[in-house]
Amino acid sequence: MAKQLRSVHSVWAALDHLSLEKTVTSQVTHRPQFTKGPKALDKHAEFRNILLSNTVQSVVPLDVFNRSLPKYSGLPKADSDQWRKDVEPLLQIYEQVTKVLETRTAHTSAYEASFSMLYEAELRSALMGPNPPQYPERYALRISKLKVGMTPPRADTRFAVEGIWLTIDVRFALGTLAERVFSHLASQPERNQAQIDAWGHFTAFIYNTCSRDAGIAFKLASSTQAHRQQLLTSMRIIKSAWRATQFLVISRQSQGMASDIEEREILTREVEDRLSLQRRNAEAIRETYIRQGGLSREVVERDFDVPVRECFKYWEDLVTTLKRPAVFYSAVSEKELQEVVGSFKEFSHRGHWYTCPNGHIFTIGECGGAMQISRCHECGSTIGGSNHQTVDGVQQAANLERIAATQGAAASPWRWNNNV
């Protein structure tokens, strides 16, 4: 399984996400004749809810995003067919991972065969004995576990968890592409609300399947007390919640709800409540795996705290934007931010990226120190500064500076930016 997963990971790492996004968005088509009645919408929602509430401990089947897509999404057939064609590279990766998840190693096959033989023998012995137990199946199961002499092999579980992670990452990519289609349709002067709603339901459903399967991965990791896998899975659970919340805001904006002051306040409170819940969850997770899980603070900081803090920073930015009624939220992917930072080839060191008091990004050239006062092109706020000191409210864009560091930008040699 390890070799198979490594092979799929290499395909995933080599995937050109930008080209894929261009392909998907170039094929978006307004379909004015498409309609969907309330009964049909309820039926699609029922199919989605049945799948999400299914307690079977296996990932969402590929077929849900492929041949059965119209059943679960409610998309126009033409949209569904085009989507499947455009995202085929992602669906192929998903299919390869699910095939890996269905395999069993020789160790596991041997364990299961031995356990099965023991169970059948013990059950026959119990039923044929002079004093059969009240619950023979339960008795045979308990005795078989004692006699088999070993716990189930953990390797399969470890690789299963890693495989589920990859399917979630693939679905994050699918969700991003579906968001692009949704936003493109919603921004057109001629729009069919039924088509937009179908894409909205489908996008939200993708993120909900991520949350569902992250829960399955967590249970698997817990069954073998794989504390680091539990920690990394918890991070994906939080990220799934963030992606679902982010799209909630985008979809509400498309419906005009975010332009109404009262509706916007309700939406803001909901986003804040979700953030507060995930903060509490993160703190509980952190303390659990440091105190009880035997993980060092360094491991928890690297594998959990850093990515979760970055996720919460995006969440906080979303709340800040919602509290400014004149500003609409637009999701920017990590890939897009990397491309923006990478386009500034003249910045050889860090310390050039800033945000205005309202969170809009701007740059300072030369040494990265502020030497003049200016205005934000987005909102008109005062930006810049003098004598290498920025005005109140201006902050360094820490997320962009981190990206610059990963792209090879050296640490700032100047004292006013030596924190980056």
Image: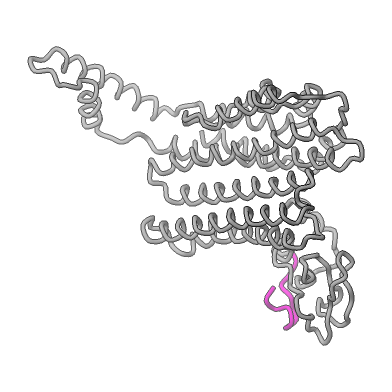
Q: In the image, is 132 to the left or to the right of 375?
A: left
Q: Quadrant location of residue 211?
A: top right
Is 418 inside the magenta-drawn segment?
Answer: yes
The span shown in magenta is: 408-420
Write the residue at 25% across / 17% down: 120
Depth check: 106 or 179 in front?
179
Residue farthest along the right direction in this orientation: 189
Q: In the image, is 150 to the left or to the right of 356?
A: left
Write the residue at 36% across / 57% down: 292
Q: In the image, is 130 to the left or to the right of 403?
A: left
Residue 303 visible within the image:
no
Residue farthest along the bottom direction in this orientation: 387
Residue farthest along the left direction in this orientation: 130
Write the residue at 88% across / 31% down: 30
Residue 375 visible within the image:
yes
Q: Quadrant location of residue 201?
A: top right
Depth check: 125 or 156 in front?
125
Q: Quadrant location of residue 3?
A: top right
Depth check: 321 or 220 in front?
321
Write the residue at 63% across / 60% down: 310
Q: Quadrant of the C terminus?
A: bottom right
- Main secondary-structure element of the magenta-colored stretch: loop
Whether residue 122 is situated above or below residue 407 in the rendered picture: above
Residue 155 spot, x, y in % from top left: 43, 38
**What count of labels does the image hold?**
0
Residue 28 spot, x, y in % from top left: 85, 33
Residue 174 spot, x, y in % from top left: 70, 37
Whether residue 270 is situated above or below residue 128 in the rendered picture: below
Residue 64 spot, x, y in % from top left: 63, 26
Q: In the image, is 173 to the left or to the right of 365?
A: left
Depth check: 280 or 406 in front?
280
Is 116 inside the magenta-drawn segment?
Answer: no
